[in-house]
Amino acid sequence: MDDTEFEEIYGGYDPQHCHFSRAIRLGCAGCSRSQRVLIAEREKISCLSRPGHARCGKILQTLVEKAVFALGVTHAGQELSHGKWVRLECGGLEALARLSGTALPDDVDGSLQRLEQAPGGLDAIPYGEVVRSISRYPRRGRRHSDLPD
């Protein structure tokens, strides 16, 4: 099965793909509303909650807009590499979990619900702290096999 055929099948099956799937697959975050889906030996993460899916989409878009400088890109519409997406998702979710009162981002939906119910809601999130967490998130170093001889 080629990538195009896979995306057609998966797109028809799961219109609510998880916005933070990279972080969940890598294990730096978890979510009570996520479900792992295996299709043709490939793993995708889907969201089981319509309100949660919308909330995560809004937060992810805001994170992209606020973290442009921290990620070293010139504008919010620029395509991000996988490593930058990982820093954005994992670093951002760590900060959001701390702001919601938990030590680890083990439930993305629960953290965002607590932040949404706090005074000021999601608009009152101190994105300066979140962006600092994104910029401090460890970058993956080069492997020795990638170094030139």
Image (tube, rainbow, N blue to C red):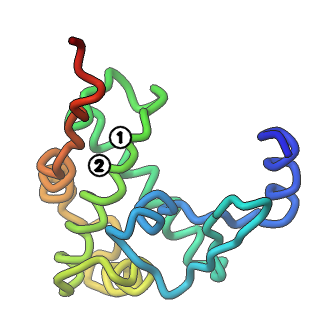
Q: In this view, does 83 lie to the left or right of 12?
A: left
- The answer to whether mark 2 and mark 1 are in CB contact below 8 A is yes
Q: Residues within 10 Å of mark 1 (few under 14, many from 20)?
A: few
Residue 148 figure quarter: top left
Residue placed furthest toward the top: 149
Q: How crowded is mark 2: few (under 14 residues within 10 Å), some or many (20 or more)?
A: many
Of residues 88 and 28, the one drawn nearer to the viewer in this rendering: 28
Of residues 59 and 44, the one drawn nearer to the viewer in this rendering: 44
Residue placed furthest toward the front: 149
Mark 2: which amino acid? Answer: Arg
Q: In this view, does 7 lie to the left or right of 58?
A: right
Instruction: Return the x and y of residue 76 as percentages of the image width and height.
Output: 41, 32
Q: What element carries label 1?
A: helix
Distance in Å between CA atoms under marks 2 and 1: 6 Å
Instruction: Return the x and y of residue 20 as percentages of the image width and height.
Output: 47, 62
Q: Residue tagged by mark 2? A: 87
Residue 129 figure quarter: bottom left
User: What residue appears at the point 55 percent right and 77 percent down from the top-left corner?
Assistant: 52
Figure quadrant of the C terminus: top left
Q: Residue tagged by mark 1? A: 83
Vertical side of 103 occupied by 95: above or below: above
Vertical side of 140 occupied by 117: above or below: below
